[in-house]
Image (spheres, grey):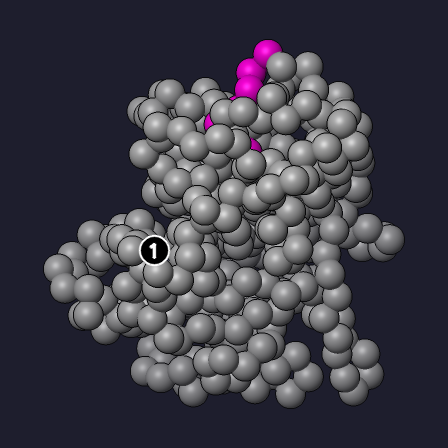
Amino acid sequence: MNTGHTRNSTRINETTPLTLSCVDLWNMRRCACTEIQQLPHAILRHQWESLCATLKYAHTHSVHYHNTLAGHSLSPTSSEELAKLPFTTAEDLTHWQQFLCISQNHVERLVRLDTSGTTAPPKRLAFSHNDLLGTQAFFSIGMRQLLQKGDTLLVLLPGAMRPNGVADLLRQALQEHHIHILTADPKCEPQHLIPLLQEHPPHCLVASPTQIIQLVQLVQTNILQPSLLRHLHGILSSTEPLSPAIRNAAYATLLNTPPNDRKLPSLLLDHYGMTESGFGGGVECPAQQGYHMRWLDMYIEIIHPITLEALPAGETGEIVLTTLTREAMPLIRYRTGDASRILSSPCQCGSPLPRLDNVKGRIVRTQHAYRIEPVTKGIFHAHTSSASL
Ligand SMILES: [Zn+2]
């Protein structure tokens, strides 16, 4: 058993001095902002310019938005005006060709998203070469919080090994840092990972919370020897909401390695993204106080799931996504079905930008109410509703 002690001494706590989130430093560079306190204003200005450009682009090039945006202002000047535009729903994406803004010949990756338990046609999301480059840039920035040159990264997410899937995009994003990227079939039983871990003990994992807790259980039941995780110092959790209990168990069991000479602290960081957001969306900084978002690539609204009215910062509702830089298939006011809220207080890392709080689950609507349900889609064995990542 490896449950005797935790490595709380190496965890980031409230008194640990932190540097500004790498995502927000990236945001600063992208909008040529030199003063951190000016960043919120600079981001808003860029978002609004990109939003208007996206509306005009989508209205001109996409059949769907040519129809749904007809008669609406394509130059909204406030969130109230933006809120008058129609939503885009998951069901709309079954008619994915109507969203295309480029020729099908120029689609670099087409992702099919099955919906389990229905006979409805699948949703599809199309990405251009430039769309995928944008995702790679975000992956490169976010993962540098967990990786050092020459590290081995094991990616366990379903579908990650496809061409231009998550692992492939990570490989392209991190190749200049000489990161050795491994994938494992997430449909296998978790103990089948052991030979891979023996041959290539990883420094970092990308895994779902379900996979993380399965690894914790393998260690706790002595099926997986902790020595196979002796190099493990970083975990990126993705695809499902991460509970505090799973985070704590991972720190206590998977990241419970002796002090080392690495420059980076041992960290488990949560990531929020979906295929619709171009895989990447936002990632925690070491303070672990919500996701630092790709604010120059997306505009987020939080709405009440029943009244559909915009909710202020701090109130939990449905995340509504508008993409700002996508070429193949921009999405305008896309109802994600995910529940979260905006955190407006400054982060411990010093960022004054708002952050998206950790996702609470999926919103399930009933006739006059709604509830938030947990999500489980990253399990090791087959799960038909998982996205083709
Ligand atoms: Zn931060």
Given the current orientation, which residue lies at the most extreme front position? 4
Above or below, 217 against 78 in this view is above
Figure quadrant of the C terminus: top right
Please state if 176 lies on the left or on the right of 248 as rendered: left
Residue at the disc numbered 1: 16
Identify which residue is drawn at 64% across, 47% down. Answer: 249
Of residues 223 and 259, the one drawn nearer to the viewer in this rendering: 259
Asked whether mark 1 and ligand 1 are closer than 8 Å, the reply comes as no
Measured as percent of width and height from the top left, residue 243 is found at 64, 57
Measured as percent of width and height from the top left, residue 68 is found at 54, 73
Of residues 29 and 149, the one drawn nearer to the viewer in this rendering: 149
Identify which residue is drawn at 61% across, 21% down. Answer: 228
Identify which residue is drawn at 19% across, 70% down. Answer: 37
* Magenta-drawn stretch contains 202: yes
Of residues 197 and 88, the one drawn nearer to the viewer in this rendering: 197
Q: Residue 378 sits in which quadrant?
A: top right
Q: Circle 1: is it few (<14), some (14-19), or many (20+) Cα within 10 Å?
A: few
Figure quadrant of the N terminus: top right
Which stretch did the figure color magenta? 199-205
Above or below, 193 against 274 in this view is above
Residue 129 in view, yes or no: no
Given the current orientation, which residue lies at the most extreme left position? 34
> Mark 1: which secondary structure?
loop
Measured as percent of width and height from the top left, residue 239 is found at 62, 49
Please state if 12 lies on the left or on the right of 4 as rendered: left
Task: Name the residue type under label 1.
Answer: Thr
Q: How many marks?
A: 1
Of residues 227 and 135, the one drawn nearer to the viewer in this rendering: 227
